[in-house]
Every structure is written in structure tokens, then in C-alpha cells.
């Protein structure tokens, strides 16, 4: 879905990510990440597909390039996208995998907050599985 050679198809794909709502209290980068997640969930982009570069998404969404980059970092951390050399961005996961990664991070944070070390959490997970 990257904008390669400025094709009309790529312009259309970039526009499928929707717009941000500046009246919404949700931070803009989270709105952008949610729009990309929704596009992946609805089949607009699947594993292996390229999505538009950050600057193209920023232009379509009417936000700063850094806002899009921040959203892409969230999605990368969730395992949904991979940002490669030459600014290529590829979908690497699906919404279910992203949700599992997000919940796992919540569990890790929760366990750390309650004094569990990494090895203790891993041992607990093995015992429960």
C-alpha cells in the first residue's frame, strides 16, 4: 500500500485510513494507530502488504509526520507493522496478534507493579498453561 510512483491506487489506499477528530480527547497518534488497525482488521491491508509512508499518511490525515511515526511505533511494538530500510512499512501481523501483544504487555506491567520478576512471571505462565 505504499505510494510508489504516485499511483492513483496508492493515493486511494492512503485515504482509506480515515481522518482524525481534533475534538476527540484521544491523542492524535492513538487515533492514527486506531485508523491503521481498523484498516488491517477490515482487510484493507494484510500481512506482507506495504502501507503508505509516514509523510503520505500525515498529508492524507492532516497531521504532523511525527504523529504518524509515533503511531507506527505503537503498531510496531504491537507486532502489526515492520518499518524497514528506505522507509518501507509492511504489515506483519493481524489484529488478533496485536491484541495478544498488547495484553501481554499489560500483564508484564501489572506483574512488575506487584513485585514479580521476569523469571517468576514466566514460571507462573508455564505452571498455568
Image (cartoon, grey):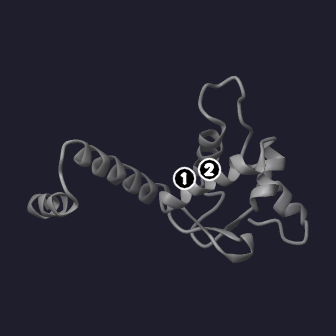
Q: Is residue 62 left or right of residue 110?
A: right
Residue 15 appears at what percent x and percent y?
79, 49
Q: Which residue is mark 1?
A: 74
Q: Quadrant of the C terminus?
A: bottom left
Q: Which residue is mark 2?
A: 71
Q: Secondary structure at mark 2?
A: helix
Name the residue at the bottom extreme. 85
Judge whether 120 appears above or below 86 on screen.
above
* Residue at 54%, 53% in the rendered image: 74
Judge whether 65 appears above or below 126 on screen.
above
Asked if residue 49 shows in the view, the reply is yes
Q: What's the distance in space between the residues labelled 2 and 1, CA to CA?
A: 5 Å
Q: Quadrant of the N terminus?
A: bottom right
Q: Quadrant of residue 25?
A: top right
Residue 30 appears at what percent x and percent y?
59, 41
Residue 106 appears at what percent x and percent y?
34, 46
> Marks 2 and 1: CB-CB under 8 Å?
yes
Amino acid at each position: 500500500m505504499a505510494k510508489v510512483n504516485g499511483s492513483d491506487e496508492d493515493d486511494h489506499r492512503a485515504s482509506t485510513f480515515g481522518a482524525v477528530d481534533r475534538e476527540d480527547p484521544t491523542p492524535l497518534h492513538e487515533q492514527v494507530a486506531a485508523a491503521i488497525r481498523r484498516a488491517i482488521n477490515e482487510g484493507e491491508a494484510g500481512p506482507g502488504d506495504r502501507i503508505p509512508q509516514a509523510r503520505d499518511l500525515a498529508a492524507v490525515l492532516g497531521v504532523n509526520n511525527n504523529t504518524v511515526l509515533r503511531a507506527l511505533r505503537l503498531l510496531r511494538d504491537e507486532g502489526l507493522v515492520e518499518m524497514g530500510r528506505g522507509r518501507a512499512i509492511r504489515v506483519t501481523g493481524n489484529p488478533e496478534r496485536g491484541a495478544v501483544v498488547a495484553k501481554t504487555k499489560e500483564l508484564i506491567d501489572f506483574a512488575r507493579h506487584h513485585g514479580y520478576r521476569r523469571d517468576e512471571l514466566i514460571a507462573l505462565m508455564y505452571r498455568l498453561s
